[in-house]
Amino acid sequence: MTTLTSDYIVVGGGTAGCVLAARLSSEPGTRVVLLEAGEASGPAEMAYPDPLAAFGLWGSSVDWAYSTTAQAGTEDAVHAWPRGRVLGGSSAINGMVHHRGHPDSYDAWEKQGATDWNYNALLPFFRRSERAEGRDPQVRGTDGPMRIEASPAPNPLAEAAFRAAVEAGHTPLDDGNGRGSEGVSWRERNVADGRRQSAAEAYLRPVLARPNLTVITGAYVRRLVLENGRCRGVEYSVAGEVRTVLSDRETVLAAGTIGSPHLLMLSGIGPVDHLWDVGVEVVADLQGVGGNLHDHVTSYVVHGSDRQPPSGPSAEAQVLTRSSDGVAPDLLLLFAGAALRPRWTGADLGGYSILFSLMDPYSRGTLRLQSSDPTAAPLIDPAYLSDDRDLDRLLVGLRLARELGGTEALAPWRTVESFPGVDVQDEESCRAYLRSTASTYFHPVGTCRMGMDELAVVDPQLRVRSIEGLRVADASVMPSGSSAEYKGALWTIPSAYIETLPVQRPRPPVLLGGFTPATLERIGRRADGWAGVGLPVPQLAYVIGQIRQIAEANGRDPDALRTVVRVNPVVTAEAAPNDAVPHRGTVAQVSDYLLAAHAAGADEVLIDLQQTARSPHEVTDLAHRFHELLSKG
């Protein structure tokens, strides 16, 4: 059996996993292994900027292709639940919407026991994740990895839809992710340079060359390796070969609302009675694992039209509103320039649709094991519309969608209401229509809920209760959903996890001004590390050797001492005499010195280009040249 060792193991290469791998590996001395069951890439359609292209990815090689159990609340329908199985996860196969929702959604987490998880606390992480140029920098990010380009110009139908929302009384917003979120706005999408930008494209692919980051695709995680109440790592298989990776620090589950609780239960962490029933040996009785499952539920109004808007990219309008006074915004209405078929089975030209989604359902379901076989799909029961209050609020959504569809602004585009149809008017028939058409909006959350009570799976630091060295940092920890497509919220969870980690850097190393025996003695006996500026390699090797000997003689682990070498070179076009290196020389000469310093025992080599570079462009150019040579060495 092949065994790897790493500082951190990240299970799942979806949205959260890509962020975690990129952020954790940004420390050069921190080893990170990312395991993803899917492949590194997939069909060409994954890059298409058209959200309707996502239909073609469902059921493909990059989709787990889950389905729910028969749902009594929706006339025993079985609902398809596509989830991404590829680097980038569902961000690689979804509709690319970038939407935060209303602050109340996040403040509700803290009220449910997730201490310090509220909108104001998460705002820095929202901003850090995005690059939204031209927006309010107080609430929007300007230099994050996820590019939020300006929406394309709206076509005539989209313009009419926006005017219809204003006509119906909804406040027009310049930025639906800005200071105000309740009202009508243009949807933002994760599209850059005419291509989908998944989490893998934004976070992971730019850092794949890091030597301390190992990404293993086609890796199906079978169970956690648990010893004496601690998670030591994971067992996984690649092409039928069983392998193990062990973590020196932590294992972080980022397998999502389905994958994370599934893996916990397969490993014996979950409701004891259920684990016994399926023949899994119990390690920790955590009753909340797999519970609290809920999802945005949606239905639609469809109008026929004898006009067709121009083909090509177009902005799309959305409305965030409330089902009643005194509640947080809980209904999202969306316009689509096509006639959608029931329950996401496709779309037709020659009409338009107004979707309405309940964003804060009361209904709660479960995720359970089908068997102890790790390859068996779990039993997914979201319990759609099992709480009658959800149907009441969807009824309001239907009324609001019909109001929008019936406005003067849309009159030139409207022929007949295809669904529900003019015959569906009384409350009983409207409720029947909703139960026959309600379906997923693809945003399940909550199965490893964060909190402080007995049913919480993780605490507010995302640590799994009763198990050391194990955390969960994905949508499964959300106590309740957000009033938006949850990917906007999902960017924040891995970043918040990073902030909970203890600082791994040692105390500031001692900067040597001379190499007296007393100085070396102090470092060897007491310091966590030391730094030298531009030391010749023979002297560097001597100093490292002396300090290690002193440390060992004083009962310390010499391997725990950190040696940092910093060089401030003047980079020249012509080669300098050897004795001038590293203070002056060509890129190749300075690179040779850095490699030699590392070989002599330096744990980290730093280069400061400010003395040489005269502009940011020159800094970037030199950095690329050094990176190329050092990577070869």
Image (cartoon, helix red, strand yellow):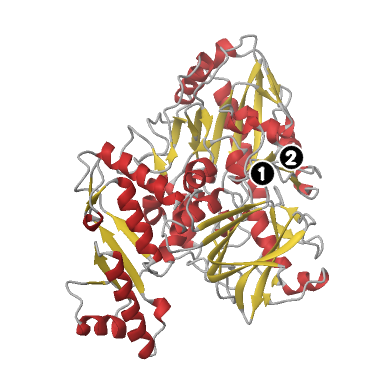
Q: Residues within 10 Å of mark 1 (few under 14, many from 20)?
A: many
Residue 351 vertical position relative to residue 175 in the rendered view, above or below:
above
Q: Position of residue 293 (x, y in %)?
A: 65, 56
Q: Quadrant of the N terminus?
A: bottom right
Which residue was labeled with disc 2?
435
Picture quarter containing residue 458? bottom right
Q: From mark 2 to mark 1, how far is it between C-alphas?
A: 8 Å
Element assignment for label 2: helix
Residue at left offset 58%, top offset 14%: 311
* Tag 2 near tag 1, CB within 8 Å: yes
Q: Nearer the viewer, residue 166 or 11?
A: 11
Q: What label does residue 391 carry, if any?
A: 1
Quadrant for residue 496, please give it. bottom left
Picture coordinates of residue 433 (x, y %)? 73, 34
Query: In this rendering, does residue 369 appear at all?
Result: yes
| Res 323 visible | no
Return the mark for residue 510.
none
Horizontal arrangement in the rendering, residue 288 relative to residue 65 (left or right):
left
Please report the residue visible at 21 percent of the width from the left and 72 percent of the height from the top: 512
Q: Earlier in the sequence, mark 2 or mark 1?
A: 1
Residue at image point 30% right, 86% down: 525
**Residue 257: x percent and y percent?**
63, 55
Establish if 194 lies above or below 248: above
Give SS at disc 1. Answer: helix
